[in-house]
């Protein structure tokens, strides 16, 4: 009897210790979980709820407006909104050109830094990454100065030698001026991701390829590029998300160019609907639709690349 009681008493601390050990990982995750719920999940749920309502005017509208339940009415309005489709088409055209150019340039720079012919690699890594370290708003202001016809040293320099100066903020060129800003800002960031993947490749593979007579270009094309394909897919997905979320550059340049409308990009359109026209419910529906489109495009690229790689 005494032995049984002793066993029960000794088992209690062990069970308590076991429960504490089991709870330890969750206690470490708890701060992140609270912030994740408050600043990620809660805004999503709030936007979904807000998108189901709208402003409703009574009588002749003299008594103001009230908030009423609208169901999926806001989403139907989004699907029939020509300004929304114009913005989507514009960012798709932007992404089709800007994303491949940026990723190809990032890949070339990463391959050059990984080669043996380049010196001062640390300096060049820092130099390529420096544009990403500049805050987006500051970078947009700097490029706006370079694009402004009255202030641009580029335009003034071309005019000084009697050469035609391009209108960087013109109707047909402003989108590509924004694309140039994105390439300048994000190429170094994507280059570092690809360069890190290149550094993880065992050097024995390169030595075997050289013994078999492969040149540096063949090693880069047939060995390095296929092995860093997952990093390229990752940067491509990030770039697609950034393309659909294009906002800062057109928002800043809209102050110096009349060719950037309030609906130039979908995110800019949702922002102006919310804060210029005070229609938060329709802006919430626009935001939800944009989130769904971002997921569709990103997941589509991921599935296509997985099928081509046989995963």
Image (cartoon, rainbow, N blue to C red):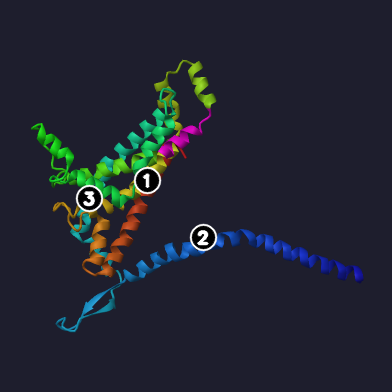
Magenta part of the protein: which range? 191-202
Mark 2 or mark 1: name the one nearer the start of the chain: 2
Which dot marks residue 89?
A: 3
- Looking at the image, the residue that sits furthest to the left is 162
Residue contact at pointers 2 and 3, CB within 8 angstroms: no
**Quadrant of the rendered image containing residue 70:** bottom left
Using the image, determine if residue 200 lies above or below residue 175: above
Mark 2 or mark 3: name the one nearer the start of the chain: 2
List the residue tagged with mark 2.
32
Query: Where does the N terminus fall, quadrant-wise?
Result: bottom right
At which x and y percent is residue 157?
Answer: 14, 35
Label 3 residue SS: helix
Residue located 31% across and 57% down the image: 290
At which x and y percent is residue 233?
Answer: 40, 41
**How far apart are the alpha carbons under marks 2 and 1?**
26 Å
* Front one among 59 and 176: 176
At which x and y percent is residue 184?
Answer: 30, 40
**How far apart are the alpha carbons under marks 1 and 3?**
30 Å
At which x and y percent is residue 42?
Answer: 42, 67
2 vs 1, front mark:
1
Q: Within 10 angstroms of label 1, few (less than 14), some, or many (20 or more) residues?
A: few
**How far apart are the alpha carbons under marks 2 and 3?**
37 Å
Q: Main secondary structure of the magenta part?
A: helix
Residue located 28% across and 53% down the image: 248
């Amino acid at each position: 009897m005494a032995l049984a009681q002793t066993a029960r008493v000794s088992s209690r601390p062990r069970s308590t210790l076991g429960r504490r050990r089991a709870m330890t990982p969750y206690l470490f995750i708890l701060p992140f979980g609270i912030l994740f719920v408050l600043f990620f999940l809660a805004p999503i749920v709030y936007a979904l709820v807000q998108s189901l309502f709208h402003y409703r005017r009574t009588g002749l509208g003299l008594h103001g407006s009230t908030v009423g339940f609208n169901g999926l009415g806001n989403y139907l309005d989004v699907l029939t909104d020509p300004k929304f489709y114009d913005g989507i088409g514009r960012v798709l055209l932007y992404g089709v050109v800007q994303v491949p150019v940026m990723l190809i340039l990032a890949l070339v720079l990463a391959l050059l830094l990984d080669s043996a012919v380049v010196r001062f690699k640390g300096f060049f890594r820092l130099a390529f990454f420096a544009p990403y370290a500049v805050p987006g708003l500051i970078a947009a202001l700097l490029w706006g100065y370079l694009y402004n016809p009255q202030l641009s040293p580029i335009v003034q320099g071309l005019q000084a030698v009697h050469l035609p100066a391009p209108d960087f903020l013109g109707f047909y060129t402003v989108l590509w001026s924004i694309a140039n800003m994105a390439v300048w800002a994000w190429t170094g960031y994507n280059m570092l991701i690809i360069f890190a993947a290149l550094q993880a490749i065992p050097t024995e593979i390169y030595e075997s390829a050289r013994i078999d007579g492969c040149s540096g270009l063949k090693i880069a094309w047939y060995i390095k590029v296929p092995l860093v394909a997952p990093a390229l897919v990752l940067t491509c997905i990030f770039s697609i998300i950034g393309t659909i979320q294009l906002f800062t550059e057109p928002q800043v340049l809209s102050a110096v160019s009349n060719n950037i409308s309030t609906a130039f990009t979908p995110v800019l359109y949702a922002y102006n609907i919310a804060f210029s026209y005070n229609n938060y419910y329709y802006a919430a529906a626009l935001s939800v639709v944009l989130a769904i489109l971002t997921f569709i495009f990103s997941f589509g690229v991921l599935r296509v690349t997985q099928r081509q790689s046989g995963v």
